[in-house]
């Protein structure tokens, strides 16, 4: 019995030890996993603080995938997207964060500011109210609400909230900036200067603070002090576009128009899409009676913002002075269409009608102008404020109203989709993907390179020719190997030997009709040939081969993508969207497919969905998506 005990006891101890080791190992694994999750979140926050917003988003993508119930990755990713101008994507992320953590004040503050950026002011105030119900002494809530009040031109309320923020110990310089700008809005210029003095004392090297104070001096007609502040601002930052704009206004007041013009030219050099610069330069050109240059600048303003009534109105005046009566009438009517209560526009149209001999029409327009003037004498303050906000919107010099015209999108290159993809056997390109193609016949994988059709191999011809020679020798030995013909076909295509390439593709497919890479690559060959000699028959061959590729491998997303590009070239926009959607279904991380689908949605004027797709493309790492977002998604 003793011997049995001596044998059994060690086994029990060993079992206990194994269980203990297992639990320690499992605990370590769990701890290691948690550390990795926290590391990605930490790395993302560091990138965010370093203003590396795209890298931050990549880290937050991984953190949210690793821990989908943690609100923090969504919150910080929303901040990064705001900084990149992706307000739509930021809104989606902050909504998810609040869904996961509905009691965080910071989340409601951020969503309030995002709603403000989207002009959803009512929702912004709801968020600030919710934040204050959680913490009524939070200074940041009052500051954010002050910004929204200021944007709504409710300057008295903005000042009240700034003072509440200060009462609750806010130490942020922005409080004084917003209060100063609000005092400026109320024409309390001396009070505004007092706030700007405090800000400048605190941050003497911030050029924008001098521009703000210069604005107050400008309205006090103290142009000498205004000019001194602007010179300081430009000394601190010679790329500050607001400083050049403000100085041009000061020079204009001082009748130094050549210097004003030089500053506007500099501003346009810094900000080529500055509508305010083009508009004011057009005014200066008009004063100098350089009407052709003025018209050019008004055209630019309207191209950047096709809802700016002042640009239409002033262009009408210039056209009238040039005796271009038809163009003048069209412009003034567009201004009236955008703002039916535009008194001066009716008076201008009356003058144009009189020139055309339409005296009855002229009299009617003058009467309409007088009726509108009389009706405005008795409107309430709230209605007056609403009208002022509406006028501010339609005289805005933001460039957010640009649009893509679907009728000429492909003809004028106003929209350019990302290029298709092609297969290479050899590649010296830095940006390339490796795909492993399953050969059903050989029951083995073959690796190929996948590159953009815009990428051309340079200094690689000798290597390609040597590879062709080697494959030719192999083919002579084993004549029935479809894979060898396929590889040689791809190599022939890369050196523009289209005849040999097509022959080899045909031979390869005759030997193995199930190889989807062969169909995909032959479609690309036909596409290259069609670019040289366009024909409907070749287009059909391209589409047929992409469809055969998809039939053999329905998960090969690049075939849908390439076919979508062909459909777009045919102006079959809905069919193209369907193909890009299929590409996304096959590969949910296909950033380029989201981007191309977004551009077509913009052509079809579905801006809401387009901006969501652009946001996703940016989130997946496609940086150029943010340029398009800035142009089309933030008006």
Image (cartoon, rainbow, N blue to C red):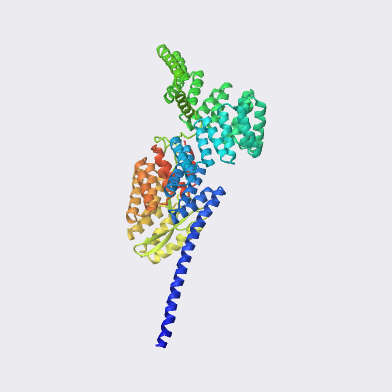
- Please give the name of the residue rendered at 47% of the width and 29% of the height, measured from the top-left corner: 393
Residue at the image point whose x is 48% and y is 31% from the top: 305
Horizontal side of residue 28 vs 574, given as left or right: right
- Residue 595 visible in the displayed image: no
Q: Nearer the viewer, residue 474 or 410?
A: 410
Q: Is residue 356 above or below residue 625?
A: above
The residue lying at 62 percent from left, 27 percent from top is: 218
Q: Is residue 314 above or below residue 606?
A: above
- Residue 53 in percent (x, y) is at 52, 48
On screen, residue 562 versus residue 321, left or right, reads left
Give how far across and how far down residue 294 sits, in percent. Answer: 54, 25
Viewer-nearest residue: 48 or 163: 163
Indicate the position of residue 35 as horizontal and vertical percent values: 50, 60
Residue 223 vs 270, above or below: the answer is: above
Quadrant in the picture for the N terminus: bottom left
- Point out residue 146 in the picture as x, y percentages from the top left corner: 52, 35
Which quadrant of the figure has residue 375? top left
- Asked if one can make out residue 594 in the rendered structure from this viewpoint, the answer is yes
Figure disc tally: 0
Q: Nearer the viewer, residue 231 or 139?
A: 139
Q: Give the answer, above or below, for where 411 lies relative to 95.
A: above
């Amino acid at each position: 019995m003793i011997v049995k005990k001596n044998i059994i006891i060690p086994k029990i101890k060993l079992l206990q030890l194994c269980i203990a080791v297992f639990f320690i190992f499992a605990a370590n694994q769990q701890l290691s996993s948690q550390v990795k999750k926290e590391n990605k979140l930490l790395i993302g926050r560091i990138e965010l603080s370093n203003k590396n917003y795209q890298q931050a988003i990549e880290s937050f993508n991984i953190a949210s995938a690793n821990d989908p119930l943690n609100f923090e990755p969504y919150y910080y990713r929303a901040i990064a997207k705001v900084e990149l101008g992706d307000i739509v994507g930021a809104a989606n992320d902050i909504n998810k964060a609040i869904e996961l953590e509905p009691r965080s004040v910071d989340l409601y503050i951020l969503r309030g500011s995002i709603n403000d950026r989207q002009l959803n002011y009512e929702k912004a105030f709801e968020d600030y109210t919710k934040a204050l119900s959680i913490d009524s002494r939070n200074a940041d809530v009052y500051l954010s609400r002050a910004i929204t009040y200021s944007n709504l031109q409710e300057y008295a309320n903005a000042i009240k909230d700034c003072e509440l923020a200060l009462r609750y110990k806010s130490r942020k310089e922005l409080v004084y900036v917003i209060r100063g700008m609000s005092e400026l809005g109320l024409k309390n210029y001396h009070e505004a200067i007092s706030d700007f003095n405090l800000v400048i004392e605190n941050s003497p090297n911030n050029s924008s603070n001098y521009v703000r104070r210069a604005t107050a001096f400008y309205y006090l007609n103290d142009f000498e002090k205004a000019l001194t502040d602007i010179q300081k601002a430009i000394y601190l930052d010679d790329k500050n576009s607001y400083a050049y704009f403000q100085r041009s206004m000061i020079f204009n007041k001082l009748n130094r128009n050549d210097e004003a013009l030089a500053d506007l030219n500099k501003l346009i050099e810094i900000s080529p899409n500055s509508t305010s610069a083009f508009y004011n330069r057009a005014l200066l050109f008009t004063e100098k009676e350089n009407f052709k240059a003025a018209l050019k600048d008004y055209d630019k303003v309207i191209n950047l913002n096709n809802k700016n009534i002042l640009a239409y109105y002033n262009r009408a005046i210039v056209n009238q002075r040039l005796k271009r009566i038809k163009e003048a009438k069209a412009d003034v009517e567009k201004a009236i269409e955008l703002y039916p209560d535009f008194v001066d526009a009716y008076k201008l149209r009356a003058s144009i009608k009189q020139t055309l001999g339409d005296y009855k029409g002229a009299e009617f327009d003058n009467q309409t102008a007088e009726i509108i003037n009389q009706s405005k004498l008795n409107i309430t303050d709230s209605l007056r404020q609403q009208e002022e906000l509406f006028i501010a919107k339609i005289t805005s010099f933001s460039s957010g109203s640009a649009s893509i015209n679907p009728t000429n999108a492909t003809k004028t290159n106003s929209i350019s989709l990302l290029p298709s993809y092609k297969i290479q056997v050899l590649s010296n390109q830095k940006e390339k993907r490796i795909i492993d193609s399953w050969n059903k016949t050989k029951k083995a994988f073959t690796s190929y390179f996948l590159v953009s059709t815009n990428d051309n191999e340079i200094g690689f011809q000798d290597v390609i020719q040597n590879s062709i020679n080697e494959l030719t020798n192999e083919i002579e030995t084993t004549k029935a190997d479809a894979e060898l013909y396929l590889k040689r076909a791809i190599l022939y295509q890369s050196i523009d030997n289209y005849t040999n390439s097509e022959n080899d593709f045909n031979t390869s497919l005759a030997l193995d009709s199930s190889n989807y890479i062969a169909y995909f690559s032959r479609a690309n060959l036909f596409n290259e040939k069609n670019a040289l000699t366009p024909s409907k028959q070749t287009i059909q061959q391209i589409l047929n081969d992409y469809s055969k590729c998809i039939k053999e491998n329905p998960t090969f997303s690049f075939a849908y993508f390439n076919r979508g590009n062909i459909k777009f070239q045919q102006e079959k926009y809905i069919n193209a969207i369907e193909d890009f959607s299929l590409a996304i279904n096959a590969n949910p991380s296909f950033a380029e497919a989201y981007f191309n689908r977004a551009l077509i949605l913009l052509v079809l004027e579905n801006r809401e969905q387009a901006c969501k797709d652009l946001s996703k493309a940016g989130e997946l790492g496609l940086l150029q998506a943010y340029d398009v977002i800035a142009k089309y998604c933030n008006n």
